[in-house]
Image (tube, rainbow, N blue to C red):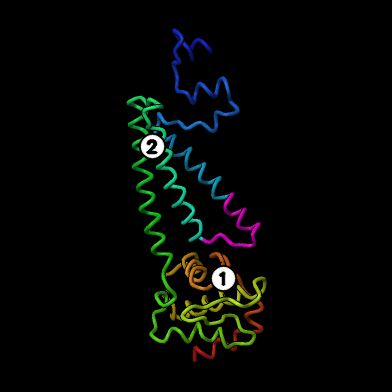
Amino acid sequence: MTKKLIKDYKIQVSYADFAKHFVPDIANDLNPTENFELLKIHRQNMFEKSKQNYIKESKLNNLIATDLDINRHYLIWLKDELKTIDNWLSPQRKPTPLTTVQINKYRDFVNNEIEKAKDEKKINTKTLQEIFIVENWQKYIDILTTCEPKLLRKENNNYKFIGNKKTQKGCIAQWFKTLKIKGIIDQSIDRGELASVLSSEIIDFSINGSTIDNVSTNYKTTFEKQLEVTLK
């Protein structure tokens, strides 16, 4: 096998394949820069690990990594990828013509992903006003500042969550789900986007898409009748 890998003191296969044979412990961390498709898969797997670490760190700090948060993390990671690509193509590394072509294909892919991530970020960062399809939209949020117990406090033009983070965040999610069902909020917005808007627009408030669909017993027993007076 060694003779097939090395001939006339020259490596006859890619560095990745060479590493798999001689140093398998580090082979999985090598970048197959001589093949665009393999490189793309390898680097996307690396991002998946980075994403899981980000989610784990968020949980350790009692935070929820929303879809918007993950998108922002991906955008930062992609921009760092461009720096990595420049490093791969540096004269000091002496990339071959084949490797240069394959890495530049990956650069095109990364740039395209950056534009897609930016577009998704624009979608996910709608304001509270933009998700409503009625003119007097503020009354449906202001009721959360006057209900008992209060869930929000209005500070200038912003809303701040002041409820119990363990038992009452789901009440706000349930209320906005109700508004969507009633056609007061744009019904084309999916649960992930709605959660992202609420998390970015309400201070000290963070949920993910699944929270929107969860049934809140606290909402039913404490808040439903108070809030739904605005629907009459």
Q: Nearer the viewer, residue 228 or 168?
A: 168
Residue 126 at x, y percent in the picture: 41, 69
Farthest top residue? 8
| CA separation in Å, label 1 and label 2 | 39 Å
Tell me where residue 218 sits by quadrant: bottom right
Q: Which mark is residue 205?
A: 1
Query: What residue sits 53% from the left and 61% below the top?
Result: 66
Residue 155 at x, y percent in the picture: 52, 81
Residue 46 is covered by the magenta coloring: no
**Sequence-earlier tag: 1 or 2:** 2
Q: How many marks?
A: 2
Q: Callout 2: few (<14), some (14-19), or many (20+) C-alpha neighbours within 10 Å?
A: few
Vertical placement of residue 156 versus 125, above or below: below
Residue 146 at x, y percent in the picture: 57, 88
Query: What residue sits 34% from the left and 36% below the top?
Result: 104
Residue 10 at x, y percent in the picture: 44, 12
Q: Amino acid at mark 2?
A: Asp
Residue tagged 2: 86
Residues in magenta?
Answer: 53-66
Residue 57 is covered by the magenta coloring: yes
Vertical placement of residue 120 versus 6, above or below: below
Q: Are marks 1 and 2 in contact (CB under 8 Å)?
A: no
Vertical placement of residue 132 versus 42, above or below: below
Q: Which mark is residue 45?
A: none
Q: Find numbered disc 1 in the image and state the secondary structure of the residue it sits on.
A: loop
Q: Amino acid at mark 1?
A: Phe
171 sits to left or right of 186: right
Q: Which is in the foreground here, disc 1 or disc 2? A: 2
Vertical placement of residue 162 versus 102, above or below: below
Q: Find numbered disc 2 in the image and state the secondary structure of the residue it sits on.
A: helix
Query: What residue sits 34% from the left and 27% below the top?
Result: 98
